Image (spheres, helix red, strand yellow):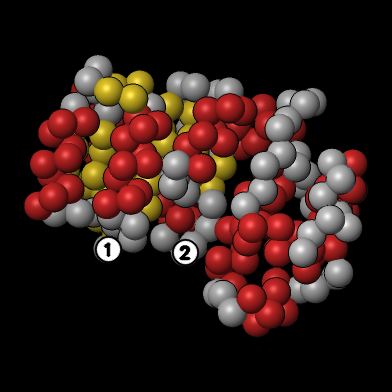
Amino acid sequence: MINVHIVDDHAMVVELLVPVINNSGIARVTGFSFKLSDCRRTLALNCPDVMLLDINMTDGDGTMFCAEAHKNYPKMKIIALTGHDEYSSVILMLRNGASGYIIKSEAVSEVLEAIHAVMHGEIYISRQMEQVIRKTTKMAVNLTPREKQVLHLVSKGMSNIEIAEQLGIGHATVLSFRKKLNLKLNASNPVELIANARKEGLIGNIN
């Protein structure tokens, strides 16, 4: 059973999520916090498998707290649960260690899908957020060294299994990197990924 902690300053959101998660058969809510300060104390005593984190909290910035929590508890998966649907917000949360991003206006079932996905090493971006990203026409592309390596191997036509063996990482980790690359380069398949990477001057300049 996956242990989940909810961090949100709206009691209604928590009351809605708790029974849905507890009745899912795959996860259970082991605690919730209405303030980041309370969450810090809880994590120090009992770190969950997954944390659902609102970005706007009354006592702090959820994006900064995401980076803090990821640094202190790297094995814990963080899923942003927010009303922000800006491309910049999802990129910032991913850079700060989040593994998922969900818009609050979406179906509650997205939360369960996200929990399952991140616990299997995937990056989960909700359907509504993916649509927003696809509509974004201009994006600043800043790849990490490992993302550049994966992109280079994808451009050579290597499969996920071959990339995993080449880089000495897990198959799920490769899937996670590819999800991030698709997000950053506004692509939905390998052909678009390579085409957009060429437009950005990323192919051919990877060591």
Left or right: 112, with 18 as reference point: right
Residue 78 horizontal/vertical position (percent): 38, 46
Residue 130 horizontal/vertical position (percent): 65, 36
Q: Residues within 10 Å of mark 2 (few under 14, many from 20)?
A: few
Asked whether the beta carbons under mark 2 and mark 1 sit within 8 Å of each other, the answer is no
Residue 198 horizontal/vertical position (percent): 89, 48
Q: Above or below — where is 77 with respect to 130?
A: below
**Sequence order check, earlier mark of 2 and 1:** 1
Q: In terms of image quadrants, where is residue 76?
A: bottom left
* Residue at disc 1, secondary structure: loop
Q: Which residue is mark 2?
A: 120
Residue drawn at (13%, 34%) of the image:
38
Q: Which residue is mark 1?
A: 1
Residue 65 horizontal/vertical position (percent): 31, 35
Indicate the amino acid at tag 2.
His
Foreground residue among 11 and 198: 198
Residue drawn at (64%, 76%) of the image:
167
Q: In terms of image quadrants, where is residue 33?
A: top left
How far apart are labels 2 and 1 at the CA level? 13 Å
Q: Nearer the viewer, mark 2 or mark 1?
A: 2
Left or right: 120, with 65 as reference point: right
Kindly identify which numbered label has been placed on residue 102: none
Indicate the amino acid at tag 1.
Met
- Split into 4 quadrants, where in the image is the C terminus? bottom right
